Image (cartoon, helix red, strand yellow):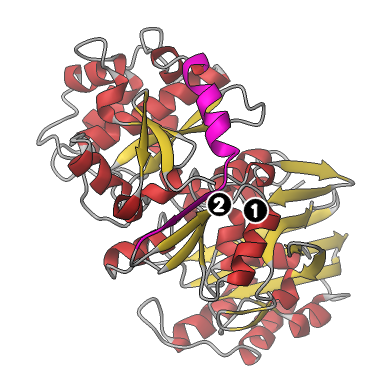
Amino acid sequence: MRDFVSFFVNGKQVNVSGAAVFKPLTEYLREDMRLVGTKVVCAEGDCGACTIFEGRLDSSQNKIDYKPINACIKYVMQMDGCHVVTVEGVSFEEPLNAVQKAMVDGHGAQCGFCTPGFIMAMSGLCEKALTCKTKIDSQSSKEALTGNLCRCTGYESIISSTCAINTAEYRPVATLYPDQNIVPALKKISGQQVEIKTEKYHTFLPTTVEELASIKEQNKGLRIISGGTDLGVVMNKMEWVPEITACTANLGNARSITEKDNKLIIGSNVTLAQVEEYLKDKCPEFSKLFELFGSPQIRYAGTLVGNIANASPIADTPPFLFVMDAQLELASKSKRRMVPITKFYKGYKDLDLNQDEVIAAVHLPLPGKDEIVRLYKVSRRIHLDISSFTAAFRLKINQDKIEQAAVALGGVGPVVIRATEVEKFLTGAPLNRETFKKAGEIAAANITPISDVRGSLDFRLRLSENIFQKLYFDLGKKELCR
């Protein structure tokens, strides 16, 4: 049992103990290590100025997989067993690397405050392009830089600079920091339990789901931190760190996706980006939703189980899980049980989860070849915004008749709901506009939305009606999820 957090920063191992463990990673990098290239602006994971690489052992345990994430909403205690690479660490052997040179030559930097974050996101795109053997173009550049904001240069020169990167000259992180120099240490670190206690705070880093469940059972009020994409924002903005926490960073047995009998088993530490990539061909409709969910930096950090456990009625992933009849595998230290996700939310932030249980995995059936899936998100901004309203549909249609229907709505009550009355009406109904108009009226009559900063009660009632007609017209385009 260790009483300190251990990780690498730009190729050098650091051990952190005491109060520093409970600092935001950006604060530790800037103040303790004097790596001030990592900037902090929003402190909520939106602007990307703090983008770094987080490198963790991949499934083979013999290679480090580097992904760009936002450092501002990560805390030091979450970094155990990883390799952090900052903007200072991507060009230490030469004046400028290929990414930085392209940015300078293309006049992509002005004040320079946002530039380090762009450099790291652009480097992440290079890493992906080299791994997948793809070319960098305008579209892939825009997708990679979705989570980065610039306030003075303007994006055209930055996009042009990204497209102009000479990937043949780009040196991947794995060549700057050879795996054989770091992997053995990371293996040793990630296989050890950690417990750190100060006068004010107490944190654990278990190595198995069973250990995590046991820790939760013994510590009432424990907050579990995985990606930290939601809790990290609360901790920053409210200047509040939970007294007792457990981090999932070292849950190596929970990072995999397996497939059996047309069903996925998604571990509790699987990131949203992993799910997105795995489903891009198997169910592109769900994979496409992640483009609206959050930036690449958020998707590489946040987990599917974290989105479920956060229990927000406007969370983006639960409606799809509802219509697919997903089940949650709940684990205690000695046993496991299955709960349909439709039964998991008993009320606002009230879960069917005992004190000695954690979510171990999501069991997700895949759509059948004859099923249509449609997902909708309404928010004030199209991209990277919290939802005002969500809807998910799974239909089976035979000629001009609806044989089966599953409907889920979010943002219309204290929890995401399965619209069972609508499902009953749609099953066996003719496939025409009048059917969907009536379905919307039934939906609106069976929900209890509230007015808040993201939308009024009347707005959400109207959305719940209109979304069915939008679905009808979308079906006419025959864009099927196969």
- Asked if one can make out residue 432 in the rendered structure from this viewpoint, the answer is no
Q: Residue at x 76, y 55 (%)?
A: 364
Which segment is the magenta one? 180-198
- Residue 98 coordinates in the image, percent (x, y): 30, 14
- Quadrant of res 440: bottom right
Q: Residue at x 64, y 92 (%)?
A: 445
Name the residue that disc number 1 marks.
Answer: 268
Assess whether residue 288 is covered by the magenta stretch: no
Does 436 sit above or below residue 78?
below
Q: Residue at x 26, y 16 (%)?
A: 92
Name the residue that disc number 2 marks.
Answer: 248
- The kind of residue on which mark 2 rests is Thr
**How many marks do you count on the picture?**
2
Looking at the image, do the residues carrying marks 2 and 1 touch, with CB atoms under 8 Å apart? yes
Which mark is first along the chain, 1 or 2? 2
Q: Residue at x 69, y 41 (%)?
A: 256
Does 157 sit above or below residue 43?
above
Depth check: 159 or 33 in front? 33
Q: Secondary structure at mark 2?
A: loop
